[in-house]
Amino acid sequence: MKKRLIVIGGGAAGFFCAVNAARLNADLEVIILEKTNKILSKVKVSGGGRCNVTHACYDLAEMVKGYPRGSRFLNKAFRQFFTTDTIRWFEERGVALKTEEDGRMFPLTDSSQTIINCLITEVNRYGVQIMMNADVKQIIPGVDKFSVLVSGSPLLTADYICVASGGYPRKPMFEWLSTLGHSVEEPVPSLFTLNMPGNSIVALMGISVEHVVARIAGTSLQQAGPLLITHWGMSGPVILKLSAWGARELATARYECVVIINWVPLFNENSLREEMQQIRFRIAGQKLANKNPFHLPQRLWEYLLEESGISTDLRWADLPGKEQNMLIKNLCVKEFTVKGKTTFKEEFVTSGGINLGEVDNNTLMSKVVPGLFFAGEVLNVDGITGGYNFQHAWTSGYIAAKSIAGL
């Protein structure tokens, strides 16, 4: 009699667990249960439909810095299956990856369908079964087998279960797992953009700045990177990273805070004041509006001049001390009031999930229920944008598969 593994969840982690378990143990019957009528839906839309497979970081200590929650857990897990293993796994199956300047890695085809096709090919190769519209209501541990209650289907049995159901936005949605004895870290949103209703900055929607430093007033939260101004406020990698690291603090503050932007991160207020003297000497006769010495987008530069009470006709030589000080402040420590957040397209993830202390990070098996495994976002692990969350999905899915295949 073949032993049976049921994988709950037809996303990246679930598929990776299923195909690797079936590949590593030919005597294993593997079934994926997906509660919707779509498989790999997040893979499909990730990276604007290109699928940000992983992040081109080959140093373990550096890679774990991309995870606001779960870095210690992944420090061990990555020793079993790391970025290099992901790249090799896909390349061995005919999917070459390319690296972009910011470290994100995509298939050469620039199409997420390439990744989906690869995983479906593996499903077919190893005879993995997929049940759609299979909403799991309850897992019942038995003496030597699990029973799985699926809405509208006969009771299923399994020797092993891997839960790869993804994150949930509210704690009660974890109840079918907490009844097994697992505790759950309160889920809160991560990777979101910041709303600034009524702020004049939104008139600059579409403008991006290559490098800024953004911090949240009254906290130690600070990030650097590209910023995008949107019709509702601010987005871009620097804001998404800030939201990931500040997910819990921002949730507690009901997404009301003050963000301080340094548009010229090579300077602080003191060093910029010294630089201003040099600038005024060099281009004294030129108008401020026409000569932007910091290479900021022109519309942003004009906005900062207006915010500083500086006329567009004013020459650098004639800039009064009061207005100069205001310009320095607006360049280095410009404050923006945040009221609310917006989900960032398909990159949305949830911070929170199954308590990591209850899961063996060498095997991904539950310490509470033997034979029960976890993979992916259902765990209290989340990464910043840029391929980090997919890498966790591949790693956790693979370790769970290897552990189950060896039992």
Image (tube, rainbow, N blue to C red):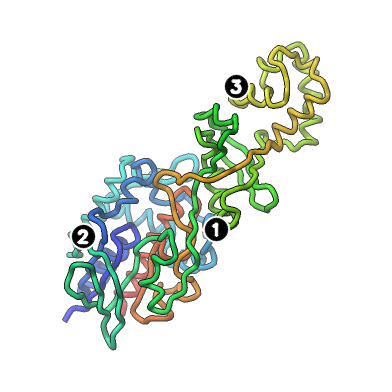
Viewer-nearest of labels 1 and 2? 2
Instruction: List x then y, in percent, for residue 36.
Output: 26, 57
Report the quarter where the C terminus lies: bottom left
Instruction: List x then y, in percent, for residue 293.
Output: 68, 23
Instruction: List x then y, in percent, for residue 340.
Output: 54, 45
Q: Residue furthest front?
A: 198
- Identify residue type, mark 2: Met
Spatial CA distance of label 3 from label 2 is: 52 Å
Number of the label disc, if any, that sits on residue 68: 1
Bin the neighbour count of mark 3 within 10 Å (Cα to Cα): few under 14, some 14-19, many 20 and up: some
Quadrant of residue 146 in the image? bottom left
Number of the label disc, if any, that sits on residue 249: none
Bin the neighbour count of mark 1 within 10 Å (Cα to Cα): few under 14, some 14-19, many 20 and up: some
Spatial CA distance of label 1 from label 2 is: 33 Å
> Compared with residue 23, is residue 286 higher up or lower down, i.e. above or below?
above
Spatial CA distance of label 1 from label 3 is: 35 Å
On the rendered structure, is 352 left or right of 13?
A: right
On the rendered structure, is 115 left or right of 203?
A: left
Name the N-terminal-most of marks 1 and 2.
Answer: 1
Name the N-terminal-most of marks 1 and 3.
Answer: 1
Q: Nearer the viewer, residue 337 or 110?
A: 337
